[in-house]
Image (tube, grey):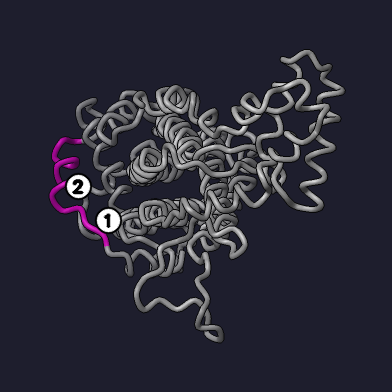
Amino acid sequence: MIPRYTRSEMASIWEPETKFQIWFEIEAHAMDAQAELGVVPKDAAKAVWERGQFDVARIDAIEAETRHDVIAFLTNLAEYVGPEARFVHQGMTSSDVLDTCLSVQLMRATDILLDDLDKVLLALEKQAFQHKRTITIGRSHGIHAEPTTFGLKLAGHYAEFKRNRERLAASRAEIATCAISGPVGTFASIDPRVEAHVASKMGLVPETVSTQVIPRDRHAMFFATLGVIASSVERIATEVRHLQRTEVLEAEEFFHAGQKGSSAMPHKRNPVLSENLTGLARVVRAAVIPAMENVALWHERDISHSSVERMFAPDATVTLDFALMRLAGMIEKLVVYPDRMQENMDRMGGLAFSQHVLLALTQAGVSREDAYRLVQSNAMEVWKNGGNFLDRLKSDPEVSGKVSDKDLEAAFDPARQLAHVDLIFERVFGRS
């Protein structure tokens, strides 16, 4: 995490103060449950809530000697609580605290990311409806294909991010588990009702089988979902980068007053936001493979996953949070040029309507093979030498002898591309 790509709300989830506060709440809630079960005195549980504090610098100093972060925390907590602290962590193991804390942190991070996705969806929806009937050329392999609308392009991105939101919500439910089951997860030293109580208080559910750690397939699925979302961010960023190219210039990022594009060339207006988003997506996806490799731990527990998660969990969530907010702002302020879209579509002399001519010929009784030959031969002449595709077809006796000028002109009517826009919008947005 670096300040340049960090928002404070998400970063605060991963700060030491937040982590130790969650640790304290886990221990204190466990004490309450133990007290109700008669395992520890109720006065001891009360003392933890009343006098329990911690000091990050002091914990760090203790850990420098003990080489164990949970013991360092418990030692510092005892310095504030006093003699009653001997009942803290009763029957628990370090992973009970660490894994349950991580679940809380990931759950809180997810809530922010879900809110971010809502902002992206709102921006996409607004732009999609604004350009619902803005005709532009569709491209396959980077080459002009057939007309579409800019609104339909954005509607596709909206549908993708809506799926991503559903995936993330499901991942939140999967990651929100609590493990307070003691060494190797058998509950031999702690009552399962303690786990249930802590889970309830922390907004979690008890882990089905925790061994001594929460199974990392949950985390792998969570970070894989973040990776998919990052890929969706990159897909729309790549689209904007292509559309902003000088030779295309159908849309571009908003250029602020006073903004500079180049230290050497004052005329430059570069797609810096979408390029930045492409790079940030790579950082988020970098967490996916390590998260999957963390699944295969030794027996009931090892800590090969720990160091990795301490690095990529904050980095991936903080980076994706920043990227989603940047994406939402970029889409909201995206500058669209309908006239340039029409100009680009007209550059090829109407070749984008070749399929409709092919269909008109087959409907007129020409075999598909012969129809394809006729359309392609005329299209290639326009491709090589320029000119108007419709005029060439009208002047070709093999074509005009089968299809009237009126029917040929109908094949070049862009209204065809708008015929089912309402249906698609209804499918995506539930309204047209």
| Residue 121 seen by the camera | yes
User: What residue sits 45% from the left and 68% below the top?
Assistant: 2
Estimate how packed mark 1 is, as few (under 14), some (14 to 19) or many (20 or more) residues with alpha carbons within 10 Å.
many
* Residue 295 shown left or right of residue 182 in the figure: right
| Position of residue 112 measured from the top left corner of the image (x, y, whole percent) | 34, 46
Find numbered disc 2 in the image and state the secondary structure of the residue it sits on.
helix
Q: Of the residues under marks 1 and 2, which one precedes in the sequence?
A: 2
User: How much space separates mark 1 and mark 2, taking CA atoms?
Assistant: 9 Å
Estimate how packed mark 2 is, as few (under 14), some (14 to 19) or many (20 or more) residues with alpha carbons within 10 Å.
many
User: What residue sits 14% from the left and 42% below the top?
Assistant: 46
Find numbered disc 1 in the image and state the secondary structure of the residue it sits on.
helix
| Position of residue 349 measured from the top left corner of the image (x, y, whole percent) | 67, 46
Q: In the rendering, which numbered label is found on residue 77? A: 1
* Residue 342 shown left or right of residue 385 in the figure: left
User: What residue sits 42% from the left and 37% below the top?
Assistant: 132
Front in this rendered view, residue 309 or 323: 323
Give the image quarter of residue 131: top left
User: What residue sits 55% from the left and 41% below the top?
Assistant: 228
Query: Does the CB distance between marks 1 and 2 fall below 8 Å?
Result: yes
Judge whether 147 appears above or below 83 on screen.
above
Q: In the rendering, which numbered label is found on residue 48? A: 2
Q: Where does the magenta region start and end?
A: 41-54
Task: Look at the magenta stretch and give its main secondary structure.
Answer: helix
| Position of residue 200 measured from the top left corner of the image (x, y, whole percent) | 27, 29
For the residue marked with disc 2, what is the amino acid? Val
* Residue 211 shown left or right of residue 182 in the figure: right
**Which image quarter holds the C terminus?**
top left
Front in this rendered view, residue 132 or 283: 132
